[in-house]
Amino acid sequence: MSDYPRLARQLEALLDSRDWLTNAAQTCAFIMQEIPDLNWAGFYLQRRAETLILGPFQGKPACNPIPFSKGVCGGAARTRQTQRVDDVHSIADHIACDAASRSELVIPIVVDGALWGVLDLDSPRPARFTRDDQTGIEHLVATFIAASDFSG
Ligand code: SME
């Protein structure tokens, strides 16, 4: 398993700008480099009401836009609960952007009480994300939020 406390310290040191766009780009690049067995890592932002718009990411070109009513990402945005899916083929409204994806972790990002966006991680390995991975990656998202100014 990844050493998430170490990764959180490294990410905190990497995010030396307050700019959310720079920090989002750095965060998904860092995750893609440091966490094994991922084929996609990136952000979707709520830039229109109830709609997720593709933001900084690493991996193949992806689906855009995603309404809150659809997919695993939409579920995370709607419920504001992390979605951890062991087998994306078992989810009826999973949106397949990259056919290689088999499991998925989507973490909602709430800023000042509003759903700002989500961080979506995809893996080609079924059941890639354990509960401990979820906790560790939620901590990385908290590090990104704490480092960033979302007003501009
Ligand atoms: N699979 C996601 C869509 C985003 S891509 O995986 C990058 C979903 O069902 O919401």
Image (cartoon, rainbow, N blue to C red):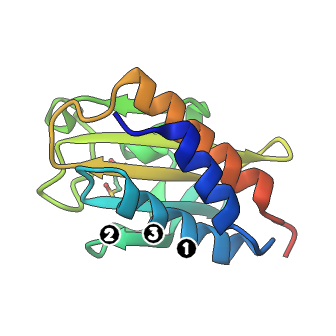
Pick the front one: 118 or 67 = 118
**Left or right, residue 106 beside residue 13:** left
Image quarter (top left, top right, bottom left or bottom right) of the C terminus: bottom right
Provide residue 53's location: percent of width, then percent of height.
53, 67
Of the residues tagged 1 and 2, which is closer to the observer? 1
Sequence-earlier tag: 2 or 3 = 3
To which residue does mark 1 refer? 25
The answer for how far apart the CA atoms under marks 1 and 3 are is 6 Å
Q: Are marks 1 and 3 in contact (CB under 8 Å)?
A: yes
Secondary structure under tag 1 reads helix
At label 1, counting other C-alpha atoms closer than 10 Å, the crowd grade (few under 14, some 14-19, many 20 or more) is: some
The answer for how far apart the CA atoms under marks 1 and 2 are is 15 Å
Pick the front one: 13 or 49 = 13
Q: Quadrant of residue 21?
A: bottom right
Provide residue 26's location: percent of width, then percent of height.
56, 71
Q: Is residue 145 depicted above or below 71 in this figure?
A: below
| Residue 29 in sight from this viewpoint | yes
Provide residue 23's location: percent of width, then percent of height.
65, 69
Whether label 3 lies within 8 Å of ligand 1 gets the answer no
Q: Is residue 150 depicted above or below 25 in this figure?
A: above
**Left or right, residue 47 beside residue 3:** right
Q: Are marks 1 and 2 in contact (CB under 8 Å)?
A: no
Q: Residue at x 27, y 43 (%)?
A: 94
Check disc 1 and give the amino acid type: Ala
To which residue does mark 2 refer? 62
Whether label 2 lies within 8 Å of ligand 1 gets the answer yes
Judged from this view, the residue extending furthest toward the top is 131
To which residue does mark 3 refer? 29
Check disc 3 and give the amino acid type: Ala
